[in-house]
Every structure is written in C-alpha cells, then in structure tokens.
Amino acid sequence: MKVKEVADLTGVSVRTLHHYDEIGLLVPDNVTEAGYRVYSDENLTTLQQILFFREIGFPLKKIKELLESPSFNRLEAFELQRDMLVAKRQQLGTMIETIDKTLRSERGEMTMTNEEKFKGFDFSSNPYEQEARDRWGDEAVDKANKNVAKFGKETQEDMNRIYYNLAELRHTDPAAAEAQAAIGEWYTFLNKIGDYSLEAFAGLGEMYVADERFTKNIDKFGDGLAVFMRDAMKFFAERN
Amino acid sequence: MKVKEVADLTGVSVRTLHHYDEIGLLVPDNVTEAGYRVYSDENLTTLQQILFFREIGFPLKKIKELLESPSFNRLEAFELQRDMLVAKRQQLGTMIETIDKTLRSERGEMTMTNEEKFKGFDFSSNPYEQEARDRWGDEAVDKANKNVAKFGKETQEDMNRIYYNLAELRHTDPAAAEAQAAIGEWYTFLNKIGDYSLEAFAGLGEMYVADERFTKNIDKFGDGLAVFMRDAMKFFAERN
DNA sequence: TATAGAGTATGACGTAACGTGAGAGTCAAT
DNA sequence: ATTGACTCTCACGTTACGTCATACTCTATA
C-alpha cells in the first residue's frame, strides 16, 4: 500500500507517515524505484501498535524504544494496551459522571466540592503509562507496578477505598491499632495479586517515599500519606 | 487558591497555569501584592471546562474563542461535552473490541482485514470536534451537525447501516427504485431528530459535496458516495 | 530575629509532533 | 502528449508546554 491508501485507511495524515519514516519509527518495508513508500501488512500491524500507544499518550520516542526492545512481545503488548484502554474508558466514565454532577449542580440541584469537579482528570490519566515505562524501562520499579496494572476496575475501587481510609488515619501514630488494621488490609489486598513477602512489603513502603512517582500519586489522597504508609508498613512488617 | 494548590487539585502543572495565564486563556481573578496568582472558584470551573475541551482534543486557541464567545452557554457546553465523552467512550469500546480480535487473530484463531485492524481510530475520533467548531464557529454548517451530534449510540448504528446500504448502491442510478428507497430511509432517519423539509434535505445533500468535511467522512463508506447521495437526495426531494 | 525551606514570578530557550507550503518528479487514464 | 491525482524532499512554522536560571516572598522554627 502507498502512503495515501494507508492514510485513508488509518486516519493519519501522509505527513505523519513521512514523519514516522524520518524518525525511524515506521519505515516502509518496500520502496519503489521512484522512491515511493510501499507499506506491507506487517507495517500496518506495527502502525496499529503505534497508534494504540499514541492514543494512550506515549511519546513517539518511547514507542520506538518499545517496539525495538528485544523483550518486546507483541501479544503481551496488546494485552497491556487492552488494560490501558479499559482503564481509560473507566476514566471517561468518571468524567461523564462528573459532568452529570456538574449539570445538576449548575441547575442548582446540588453543590460540588472542588475535588469532585476534577474527578477523572486527576491521577487516572497516567499511571498506566508509568506502568509500561516501568515494565520495559526501569526494571527496578517493574514488579510492583506490574501488579498494580493488573487491577481490574473493582479491585481498583477496593484500592481507592483503602487509600481513603488510610488517608483519614494519616495523622495518627503508624503503630496505632487502626492504622495497623488498615495496613493489614492493604497487605492482604496486594497479596491477592502480588504475593509479597513481609520484607518485600516493607520495601514497597520505602519505595512509596523514595520514588516520587509513587509519592506524588499516593499523596493525592492526602498530604504525607506516602510517608505515613511507609512507616506503618515497616511497623507492620516488623510485627508480623 | 494559589498555583500549586490548583495544580495538585487538577493534575495540571504550574507551568501550564502560567501558560494559560500568558495566553489569556485562564487569567486568575486575583493577584496578591507580591504578584502571586490567586484562583477563584469561578476560575476553577472555567479550568474544568478548559480541561474537558482539551481532553477532547481542542486547540487552546479554539477553547479560548469558545469561552469568550458571547453565545457560549455553560450548560449547553457541558451537555455537548457529555455527548463527546460518551462518543469517545464508545470509541474506546470499539478499540477494545479491535484488540480482542487482534489477540485472537495473533493466536491464529482468526484473521482480520486491514480495515478491521483500524476500527476505532478512524473517523470516530474527530466528528464531535468538528461539530462543536461548527456549532459555535461556522454557523452555516451548524444545524445539520448539531443534529448529528445528538445521535445516540443506537441511532449512530442505524446511520451506519443506512450508509453501508447506500454505499452498496452507489453504482446504480440515483433515481433507481432501490436507491430511492434507501434515501427515503435516510430522510425518515434524519427526521427522527432533525425535522427537515424537502428543500432542506436537498440542501443537505448539496452540502455533502460542497463541504469537504462531509465529503471525506461520507466517502469513507465508499468512494463517490457523497455525490451519489447528493443526487439521490435531490431526486428524492423533487419527487416527493 | 535571622534563616532555611517551600512556594512563586518572570524570562528565555528547548522540544515534540506534526502542519503547511514550495518546487519537482511519477503514474495512469484519456 | 497531456492532465490530474499522487508522490518526493527540503525547510520553516506552530502548538503546548518542559526545563532551567535567577530572583523574590512567605512561613515556621532555632
């Protein structure tokens, strides 16, 4: 297929295809004598991958790295993409709810807090990108995040609930009974999918503070929550 | 609220807020003596609007025009945004299905056509943006598009079905019986929501060819479909 | 009350992902 | 042989911020 056919089929511009060729992201398998780009079916599948990742918000540079990475597995990638899309759809659902609330609010039927106004924008827009970065990028954070990525919608809600509970407790002593109970819940929860030893659990707590990507996300549930969790997790690990 | 609070609440960066101030998109209602930006609740609501439009893919320039437009109605805007989000969620659903198919295909359980590979990317990603542009921008195309925007998911499918049927007929004579029957369906369909007179209907047909945004989208269902439809619609209007 | 630490401000240059011509060659159909 | 639709390669323009650098402000604490 030549450029325009591909463009029409996929909805991207010809210029975009040129660009992808330039940066080596999608180099057509064949070129005619006249220098015309000719795309193979294989090229089209790659383009599909590229567009998926782009839709999620990946920079092209990262996409290129991904596709070139020897550990890149097409199937696995599709599965991850699926998870991401589901998550994004979930997020859109939240945004729609937010709008519905806004509409009722504008009609004077109710009032909204500022936090409510921004539900759906926040937080949820990027964790999966992070996840994938980690999965194929920084191997260090890989494992923990991989698990997080597997959360379904329901479990995600579980997680939020626990987070919120913890956020309420964040001013108490990490060693206090309620705090320890809550952290215990967290431990159980993570083990539903992650299978953490106590040391790994404590280590994860350390990471919450050491890695600002975690810190930032966690602290959105309440300032200082990451630190609080780390302490509580450490205490929990030592006592169990 | 000061910049960082807003940033933390909404998930945008401080720089972004600065930028929005610079270009006059979101100018904080108050400024302290020291020159610190202070955002009001009103500002936050505006920011919410901005982020919604941005999520849909509107350029900031257009967003600014929208917000400044005297005809801009907050409530109406939220309603449109809702429609767009629903559409986008729908689209994500399609993409997820596409992935599922791809996965089955990669496992060798089935094969996919190239068109199928790109379902969800194409076409559906932008018509609502167009719609909104038109709604507040080119008043000319306004009415027709507004109606299209109101299509729910089901009616959208109806529309596609009719389009496909028409696409199959596009080589026949526009005055042929089947063609006229199909166009009749189209007329009925549009009237379910749009209330078109015969002249308006014929005029709409003209627009399918005159306005390349329509032409392009329609012709995706089959080359020359727009022209065929225009002719058939004209014939239909004259005979009824 | 001095000082540190966190927050904020204004430039100003950098970057990503194309858009948008300009000028020229290519191809299929008439 | 010519026309019209495609294609190519520069090359500069644009959008929406990111990323320092440098300097001021504010608040909590020694």
Image (cartoon, coloured by chain):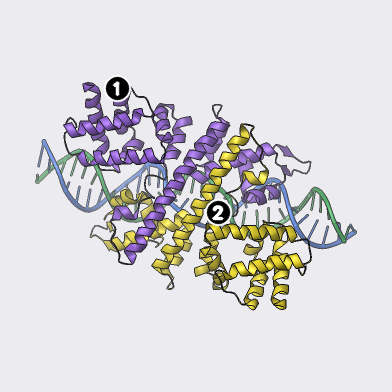
Chain colours: A purple, B yellow, C green, D blue
Name the quadrant of the N terminus of chain A: top right
Residue at image position (46%, 66%) is B65
In percent of width and height, residue B100 lies at: 56, 39
Mark 2 to mark 1 CA distance (whole Å): 47 Å
Q: Which residue type does callout 1 highlight? A: Leu
Residue at image position (25%, 32%) is A183
| Image height of B63 relative to B14, above or below | below
Q: Circle 2 sits on which residue?
A: B125
In percent of width and height, residue A71 lies at: 54, 27
In this orientation, does residue A206 appear? yes
Could you say whether the residue bearing mark 2 is in a helix, strand or loop? Answer: loop
| Image height of B238 relative to A48, above or below | below
Could you say whether the residue bearing mark 1 is in a helix, strand or loop? Answer: helix
Q: Circle 1 sits on which residue?
A: A198
Residue at image position (44%, 32%) is A134
In percent of width and height, residue A177 lies at: 17, 31
Dot 2, crowdedness within 10 Å: few (<14), some or many (≥20)? Answer: some
Q: Chain of mark 2?
A: B
Q: Quadrant of residue A218?
A: top left
